Image (cartoon, helix red, strand yellow):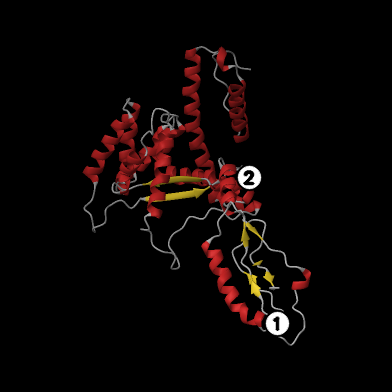
Amino acid sequence: MCLPGQAPPAPETAADAAAMARAALGWLAAADAASLTAAEQADCLRALEQAESMHTAARARVLAAFAAAGGYEDDGQGSAKTWLAWQTRVTGGAAAGALGWMRRLAAHPVVRDALAAGDISESWARQICAWSDLLPEDKRDDADTILLGAAAGGARLRDLEGLAEQIRQRTARPDADEDDGFDDRSLRLATTFRGAGKLHGDLTPQCAALAAVLEALGKRAGPEDLRSKRQRDHDALEEAMRRLIAAGCLPERAGQPTQIQLHLTLDQLRGLPGAAAAEAAWAGRLRPARVMTAMPPSSRSPPATSTPTSWTASPPHYRPDEAPRPAARAAWTAETALTAPAIRAGRTTRPTWRGAGWPGRPPGRSCSLTRPT
């Protein structure tokens, strides 16, 4: 057992080291952090950040050896990524991130050693690697050493960015073609739970002008607008895409303009705010105002006689509080004209008034036939 202030014994095996790491983190996770002083809390936060850096370096080293030996094949997996997602129960993106660190630190051994020693945070190490990746391969180790030394000396991230730009200008080679030099441009939109999305990308200066669009459409609507800056940027991007589609400037697909299709059930539609009032107003406008004239049983079939019988068709009747629609009157008149010759000939033809249906009633309503006395 270690005495207070005494360093713990070094682990003898990898299993011992992993067990000690879990035990230490488990103790901190269960500790009463509120009972610690501000200085102790600050020490813990700095130590945990160093532990995260060491964890990244250790995982990259072990994963590189595991992938090189094909250890994932023993469990029937085709790659280290699928093995990580299966055995460590992480998402595919997290597994890809672990492999990315494995490759990144293999190409930047100086940064790997700094991470293993806890001299730099994981986020700063990623940024330093991104800056030195823009340099010729034979200059990257020297650039990493210079940037890490500046970081250890107290330089801020903005200072490191300026230093990296100076290194790039001094070591850049002449352009071999007319390319813009930004081969790392990328954009990735991943679809997550229930159709939500996650957007990642590295934009060129021309594409980064999107900030002007977000600024124009992401302003506060008034003092009652409590959205955060990120929420307003999200809503501004959504509004910009909606306006682009509505403007009809997008290329057609299969001869059809670009459309947005929303799939929802009737119950979902009726459950939206304001749906009850809209449904009542819509039903009030389309409710049928027709009262059909009943045909007497004796008039449904004309009597069998050799004398031609004259029949007339009466138009559908409407309630007094609603006037007949012109389209309905025109449809009835046209059909009556077509069926009148058959009626006059004495055939038992019953004309049917055709029209659009309404909720609860199918299309096609009958008009009445009356025989004059």
Q: Position of residue 328 (x, y in %)?
A: 56, 64
> Decide: marks 2, 1 in contact (CB < 8 A)?
no
State the image quarter where residue 11 is shown. Answer: top right
Front-lying residue, 241 or 52: 241
Drawn side of residue 242 relative to residue 137, left or right: right
**In this view of the protein, which residue sits in the foreground, 373 or 350?**
373
Q: Residue at x 56, y 17 (%)?
A: 33
- Residue 309 in percent (x, y) is at 69, 81
Q: What numbered label is drawn on residue 87?
A: 2
N-terminal of the two: label 2 or label 1?
2
Q: Residue at x 57, y 44 (%)?
A: 275
Cα separation between marks 2 and 1: 82 Å
Q: Is residue 275 above or below residue 256?
A: above
52 up-or-down from 352: above or below: above
For the question of whether residue 248 can be seen, the reply is yes
Q: Position of residue 162 (x, y in %)?
A: 26, 35
At label 2, the amino acid type is: Gln
Residue at the extreme bottom of the image, as rendered = 306
- Is residue 203 placed above or below 367 in the rendered structure? above
Look at the numbered disc 1 and give the secondary structure of its residue.
loop
